[in-house]
Amino acid sequence: MATAASALLRRAPFALAAAVPAGLAGCNWLGSESGDGHKFRIDAVDVLPITHLKDQGFTSAGLSNQKSFGYAKFISDDDCVLGDVILKKTTDPVRARAYMRAGPRETLHFDPKDTRAAIVTCGGLCPGLNTVVKNLVEILGTRYGVEKVYGIRGGYRGFTAVGWDAPLELDAAAVGDVHREGGTVLGTSRGGFDAEKIVDWLKAKRVNQLYVVGGDGTHRGAYKLAELCWEKGVNIAVAGVPKTIDNDIPLVDRSFGFDTAVAEAKRFVDVAAVEARSFPRGLGVVRLMGRDAGFLAVHAALAAPGDVDACLVPEKAFALDGPDGLLAYVADRLERRGSAVLVVAEGVGARVVDGAGESVEVSGDVGPWLCDRFRDFFDGSSPLRAKASLKYVDPSYAVRAAPSNAADTIFCSRLAQHAVHGALAGYTAFAVGAVNTHLAEIPLSDFANRAAVCSVSGRLFGDLVRSTGQPSFVREYDAVCDDDLESPTGGCVVTWGGPTETGVVK
């Protein structure tokens, strides 16, 4: 820990204060000669540990990794990634949270020639799933030379089902071009999780590496599997690669596939904008995925500056009626600009209120429901309510079924490789993610009962409001973050009471 903190200080782009007490990092403004107290400081770095199998009583092979990765710059437990890189001037003690850095280790816990791995993809589709699978298989088989790699078909239920979803044996040839395609070559599903049966299957097949690719529910299951392996005395490493196009995985900069999803969604925003501008009083409504978090809608709207007049997200309440409501705002935009475009996240229906602030029940999908409200309002009964030419676009499945773009392909390959590095070194119950642009190993337990949502009081959402020109609507019903830390994608972390509730504060 002290070594990592010292390394951090050596790289700091500002002058270290003179006469810093032992164990205390303090920094003055560059060029300051006053030395009258520390303006920026970190007193301690708390690194969240990752469980190592040898600490659970399992014997390590203790093999050198030079043969597999002789070119690599190996990392050690002295390397960490800070969870927050924003500092504020203070004279109070500051403790920084950090994660273990991801990457190849010099010593392997598992002997590759006696190692069998299994890969499973669970939950909804997301761009990049095949890219992750391909890179997991190739680094396991080609670089490390493990004995066998199983592909579990159809999600968690594929461990115990029979028939079409029986496990596959994968090698580099089997996954050669799958990264060019959307979806997942392994198939996927929701549910079907039975920890006892899955661990029994892993034992029967002599699998000692399990790679789980999925969202928050999938990773909760992965943590249960890791715990059960410890309890049963089974020497198995469980590693996760988080995915969701909603980008609602907490603690990480972004989830893989999100960059591709934004690019795909933006194409359909362009379609709605062209349609709206081409017809008198054209009104385009684009409905995007985002059940509890509006990242996709926000970023797609920001990617179309000047084209989007309002972006509605699950974290931000809005009134439909009244002088400050959505209908009045859209009517004004149609009157002044001749057209309008709205981008709507699917989960926004939970935060609709009437002019008096009372909750409005949204029946069915919010996209068609909102279009019906616009048709009712723009009925031609007055100049303000003159007929509008409504164009509705719902590209949801087209967005999530796309293959990964260039940026996501690189990101997916790095996530997969670093998951393998950590697992073969003997670490377990962790997921690999980007934290402040650096890949880190995050304990699966740190995801428990937490989610990422858009910070509607944050800087990125402020940029969105300036881009669209939309009003603040209703603030008192907005989602509330745990703290004021904002991720690079404009998110914050919320913690809730249990796994059956959503991460959004209702």
Image: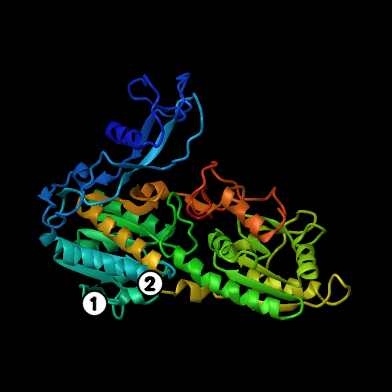
Going by the picture, which residue comes out furthest to the right? 382
Question: Considering depth in this image, is 19 or 478 the residue closer to the camera?
Answer: 19
| Quadrant of the image occupied by residue 356 | bottom right
Q: Residue at x 44, y 49 (%)?
A: 251
Residue topped by disc 2: 188
Q: Residue at x 73, y 81 (%)?
A: 279
459 horizontally vs 444: left or right:
right
Here the colouring is rainbow
Q: Residue at x 35, y 33 (%)?
A: 9
Q: Please report whichever mark, 1 or 2, sits nearer to the chain's N-terminal start.
A: 1
Q: Is residue 205 visible?
A: no
Q: Counting other residues with Cα less than 10 Å from the Cα at mark 1, is it few (<14), some (14-19), or many (20 or more)?
A: some
Residue 174: image tag: 1
Q: Quadrant of the N terminus?
A: top left
Up-down relation of residue 48 to residue 461 (above or below)? above
- Residue 140, percent from left and from top: 20, 63
Question: Considering depth in this image, is 458 or 499 the residue closer to the camera?
Answer: 458
232 horizontally vs 453: left or right:
left
| Quadrant of the image occupied by residue 168 | bottom left
- The answer for how far apart the CA atoms under marks 1 and 2 are is 18 Å
Q: Counting other residues with Cα less than 10 Å from the Cα at mark 2, is it few (<14), some (14-19), or many (20 or more)?
A: many
169 horizontally vs 299: left or right:
left
| Quadrant of the image occupied by residue 21 | top left
Up-down relation of residue 165 to residue 342 (above or below)? below
- Residue 504, percent from left and from top: 57, 53
- Residue 435, percent from left and from top: 40, 49
Q: Secondary structure at mark 2?
A: loop
Amino acid found under the numbered disc labelled 1: Ala
Up-down relation of residue 363 to residue 66 (above or below)? below
Q: Is residue 118 visible?
A: yes
